[in-house]
Image (cartoon, helix red, strand yellow):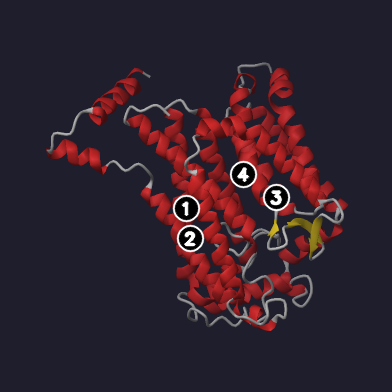
Amino acid sequence: MRKRVTLTASVRHVATAPFSGGALARDTRAMLTYDASLAWTSLLLLAFGLVMVYSASIAMAEASAYTGNRAWYFLMRHGMFVAVGLSIAAVTFQVPMKAWERLAPWLFIAGAALLVLVLIPGIGRTVNGSRRWLSLFVVNVQPSEFMKLAVVLYAASYAVRRAAFLTAEQPLKRTLIRGFLPLFAVMVGVGGLLLVEPDFGAFVVIVAIAFAILFLGGLDWRLFLGLALLLPVALGAILINAPYRLQRLTAFLDPWSDPLGKGYQLSHSLIAFGRGEWFGVGLGSSVEKLLFLPEAHTDFLLAVVAEELGFAGVALVIALFTWLLYRAYAIGRQAARHERPFAALVAQGIGVWFGVQAFINIGVNVGVLPTKGLTLPLLSFGGSGIVANCVALAILLRIDFENRRMLRGYAV
């Protein structure tokens, strides 16, 4: 601990020393106020998504009376969502983390209220058999996307407030009652609302976020062992309660047994991957997007990437996400070294959110996970998802910005 304090003090002395030219001045000017690699990675993913959404949606837009048969319909809407998301992100970046910590419980309550509104007939909007949207006339809002961010903030705030009750130093019973059960009960309530919609994909992501943050916040490992033993039971109950989920599971195991029925989406996704080979058939030249592959611009966008740009395109997407997740973890670890537990858990929670959702989407596209309605963060078409992702990245950049200010000796 003494070494870390000494290092911080020396860096602070250098950062606050007056400019006098030479190497010291150049080094001080070189210290950026934000993580440039994270910002450019995020912008590159957004730009790449804009191009691929346009490519994947042209045939669907031209064939639909809903879009007015305009080939550029989804491109314009997606571009608008990206612009709105970046604008809100610019405002979000100005909000200090102390304010987010105070607001976290209220944002969570607001998110839960929106999930309730979705289920009220006449207010919630049903699409493809799922009631997940609130209509604002011009656009539809999907509350579950913003709930993911609210859960990151609330779980981090909860872990900080209950830190004394989460560690193995406490008796297990006290850890269970005072540390774990309150958040578990809240997550069960939110999970119940999501399953009623139904939105099983969002449910999985939100549960993963909450428990990953608790684990990173120091929750007793014995409770996680108990959860791991209960998981198969809970999964079995969910499958029994909704038989169509069991059908999706069997389709994922052998999509070719019913390629025109239960395995239709996955079989066409695998065909797209097969056609792409190493370098793809060329941007804009996909055959599967010509009304063969359902949801080509949303859930199965990666399949179009694979067909048009091949293994190289998919590898680029995975590499960009890997770097984004690495930076989220590194920023969180640096915040922890500065004794900012809330900021640290939020940064790593955002990393868990993007990582789990990207992993599930990629796994679904390549056929190693059951088909779920989860988009690929920052790339897939969808207004609520894009805006929520941009806000989350702005908060992550804010955490890094405050870390860098502390290295310079400024208060945050």
Q: Which mark is residue 149?
A: 4
Residue 152, relative to residue 131: is it above or below? above
Residue type, mark 2 in image: Leu
Query: On the rendered image, what quadrant is the C terminus found in?
Result: top left
Q: Which residue is depicted at the point 49% across and 35% down? A: 96
- Dot 1: element: helix
Q: Which circle marks residue 144 in the picture?
A: 3
Query: What residue is shown with label 2?
Result: 45
* C-alpha separation, residue under disc 2 versus residue under disc 4: 19 Å
Query: Residue 322 bears which disc, if any?
Result: 1
Circle 2 packing at 10 Å, graded few (<14), some (14-19), many (20+), is: some
Mark 3 or mark 2, earlier in chain: 2
Q: Position of residue 298 (x, y in %)?
A: 63, 66
Q: Answer with the quarter of the image where residue 219 lies.
A: top right
* Residue at x 55%, y 76% (from the top left corner): 55
Counting residues from the N terminus, which is met first, the one under dot 4 or under dot 1?
Answer: 4
